[in-house]
Image: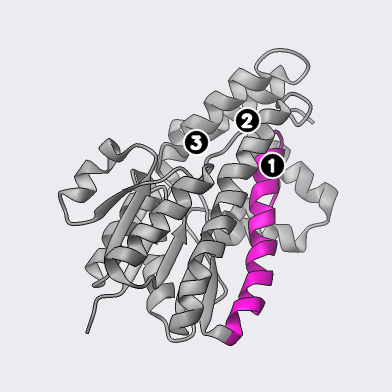
Amino acid sequence: MTAKIALVTGASSGIGEATALKLQDLGYTVYGAARRTERLEPLADRGVLPLAMDVTDDASMRAGVERIITDSGRIDVLVNNAGYGSYGAIEDVPMDEARRQFEVNVFGAMRLAQLALPHMRAQHGGTIVNISSMGGKIHTPLGGWYHGTKFAIEALSDCLRMEAKPFGVDVVVIEPGGIATEWGGIAADHLRETSGTGPYAKQADAVATSLSSEANAKRNSPPQVIADAIGKAVTARRPRTRYATGFAARPMIAVRRILPDRAFDAVMRRATGIPA
């Protein structure tokens, strides 16, 4: 049997790297995509095929999918993992940065779905895995633009799931909780640069500290837990529509579902150390 083909974006580190290796262990031929291919060398040494791709560049995405189809003739799994957290007060974040956050986290993922779907429909099979976050179900202060992207991924995935079902294509949402990657430190740096001075400075300091604290780093789950969830999803005969996993994901989503808005606001203020 010809090996199934998977494309994983944001594969140079963290969740993407762990996922590429997991799918390879499951027997997939895996293309690991990132903007800088030199960061994919450790994966390439283990047999993952490196692919230069910028999810904000349409020509780059088209070229990447075309290479996969030319080389392999099919695409069975698309894991939309590329993304980052641009934290800062909604008032402070420049609109160019807000747009870039949506370009990377939302439009890049949906464009790759558009490019993969014709091939998956022709095969009458495939799985699109969109990496959301528990942040697609909850809200935190100074994370508005980031949460906006993840809420959008949740809604778009629901619609896409219904549209793709008649063609044998599954759409799965992964909702990570706290994961031990460089994400928190990058988000904290963005936050301090954007809102570290001015009227939101006290909030920014508290939230940045919570994002990058050593306590969080010790509690956070390893990226492998997300890779394992993706592995379950793509090999299941009938995958779940959502997999919430990783530190605090399930309890936080449950608390948000139960509590009224203002009560949840208070919980989040306490959790991030923001004065009432």
Q: Secondary structure at mark 3?
A: helix
For the residues bearing labels 1 and 2, Cβ distance under 8 angstroms: yes
> Which residues are drawn in magenta?
138-166
List the residue tagged with mark 3: 184
Q: Earlier in the sequence, mark 3 or mark 1?
A: 1
- Residue type beneath disc 2: Val
Residue indicated by mark 1? 140
Residue 143 visible (yes or no): no
3 or 2: mark nearer the eye: 3
Q: First in sequence, mark 3 or 2: give its number.
A: 3
Q: Residue at x 69, y 13 (%)?
A: 197
Kind of residue indicated by mark 1: Thr
* Image-quadrant location for residue 151: bottom right
Q: Are marks 3 and 1 in contact (CB under 8 Å)?
A: no
- The quadrant of the rendering that contains the C terminus is top right
- Tell me what residue is drawn at x 65 percent, y 21 percent: 194
Q: Position of residue 96 (x, y in %)?
A: 68, 29
Q: Position of residue 126 (x, y in %)?
A: 45, 76
Whether residue 150 appears in magenta in the rendering, the answer is yes
Q: Main secondary structure of the magenta part?
A: helix
Q: Disc 1 on helix, strand or loop?
A: loop
The x, y position of residue 18, in whole percent, is 32, 54
Tell me: residue 147, above or below residue 3. Answer: above
Mark 3 packing: few (<14 Cα in 10 Å), some, or many (20+)?
many
Q: Is residue 206 above or below residue 261?
A: above
Q: Quadrant of residue 100?
A: top right
Answer few, some or many: residues within 10 Å of disc 2's Cα (few below 14, many 20 plus, some between 14 and 19): many
The tag on residue 207 is 2
How many angstroms separate mark 1 from mark 2 (CA)? 9 Å
